[in-house]
Image (cartoon, grey):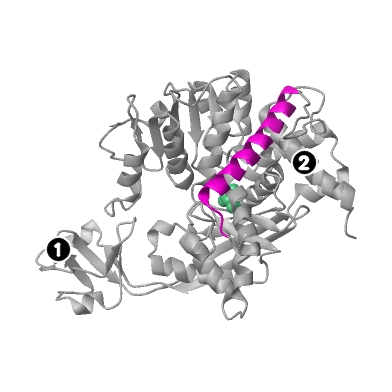
Amino acid sequence: MRMLAEKTKRTIYTEAMEIFEHAADLIGLDPRVRLELEEPDYEHIFYVTVKLRERLVPLPKEEQKRYADLPESVVTEGLEPLADGRFIIRGKALLRSNVTVRDGVIRLAGNGLYRLEPAQVRRFKAYRVQHNQARGPYKGGVRYHKEVSLDLFKSLAAEMTWKTAIADIPFGGAKGGIKIDPRHYSKEELERITLRYMYRLKDLVGPHRDIPAPDVGTNPEVMGWMFRQYSDGERERHNLRGVVTGKDVRIGGSEGRVKATGQGLAYCVEDWYADRKQTVAGQTFILQGYGNVGSNAAEILCSMGAKLVAVNDADGTIYNPQGIDPVRLTAYVYGNPKNINKSIAGYPEAEAISKKAFWETQADFAVPAALGGEINADIAEHLKVKLVAEGANGPTTPDADEVLQARKIELIPDIIANSGGVTVSYYEWLQNQRMEHWTEVEVNDRLQRAIKTNWRIIRDIAKNQPRHNADYDSRRYCVGREVDTRTAAMVLALKRIEAHYQLEGFSQ
Ligand code: GLU
């Protein structure tokens, strides 16, 4: 009976926590620590309201006949195209041009009929989940995406707690964001929404309290707006720069931060091959997602000599067995204003294939770098790779994990594979505290040493191979038998967190 009740209540969060429960059992985690970690410290849900701009909305087909005789209007500037087919009207764009409007309908030269939608006010649901701060201030990204929920942010926040522990940086875990598709809003609207979001967050965050950073749908520009709102009116603004990381390098961001997640992933893959006395050079791979993580991982892995043979994103899939050049692909996706969806779809130097064919492409390794839950048991059953290196957070479901293990497909789990981002966030925060600016070489040297060391400790735990050398000591982490790598990573995280409770005790 109880089993049944538990089964039906399986959510993104309970699914994400299965590995926690498993590792906690395995190491006999202190029961009080377990209770502390099983649920977040705080779950904040709030709303932000903003006034949007005027828009031009495509006129539905059935209404178009009535305007067949409407002459074309030429608007040369002030219209910003959105991914949903609408246009934002900037400033007095329409007033300045010579346009013909009838019943609020306009025919844009070369584009068809649109209805003028007056500026509207909108409300968005916003979140910040602060999972744990035993090891330091809450830390984690801000996600702007249409499919987010409290349950999702709870799992992502918990994942940050494990990730910061594995990266061995003095932070806890948090995550938040807004339920919104940012591609449907203009830059100026996103700025207003972000300012409103940070206005509501102001008492919850701070350089020593909770430190947001970019995640899906946000970027250094958004971090700049968040910093401005947080520090607005403060005399000693410079002391507050560490309130967000992932800032532009010109305002206190770190060199190498934008590439850091992809860079860290590449270091892990490099070490996975080194452990087998092989190199990345000549290995083929498939990549899901071409955002910040995917595009940078691709460029770095290919500069190491790997060959990218297939890419899938939300809008399409491309394949070329001769290799896809990520520098050219990045130019196609990000360097072309006509590519409004910022998608790889339609890339001319590869052929379009189905998503199913993508996951079944023969390659040496796969990099899922899009959203969570993408590799399910069925896909895992059909993968034709030897290794999965997780760039995304939670891309593999627990059922798929079992299939991968049964099929002996190896795994570099997300909490180590994508920890390069938050690691360099820590370097950024350190530079902000110390008023320093490190070079990219310094950043990458530190990152490489840190991530490879922690990855080797995880490997030692997995192989039950306690070691002590000049770089690290894995003896206190091994559990006396071999475990899979995802469990091994979680063991490392939990032992590091547990040490804080054991040595500092609980605040009453
Ligand atoms: N959003 C990134 C992650 O999921 C980076 C977080 C950070 O730098 O705080 O790891």
User: Which residue is at the front of the view, 130 or 298?
Assistant: 298
Tell me the crowding category of disc 2: few under 14, some 14 to 19, or many 20 or more residues within 10 angstroms, Cα based.
many
Q: Is residue 31 left or right of residue 419?
A: right
User: Which residue is at the front of the view, 241 or 98?
Assistant: 241
Point out the image quarter for the N terminus. Answer: top right
Residue at figure coordinates x 50%, y 40% from the top left? 369
Q: Position of residue 251 (x, y in %)?
A: 51, 65
In this picture, is 199 found above or below 461? below
Which residue, given by chain and number where applicable, does mark 1 sit on? 109
* Most frequent secondary structure within the magenta stretch: helix
Q: Quadrant of residue 398?
A: top right
In this picture, is 38 found above or below 322? below
Residue range corresponding to the magenta coloring: 437-464
> Which amino acid, by three-letter code, is at mark 2?
Leu
Residue at figure coordinates x 70%, y 35% from the top left? 489
Q: Position of residue 338 (x, y in %)?
A: 26, 53
In this picture, is 63 found above or below 343? below
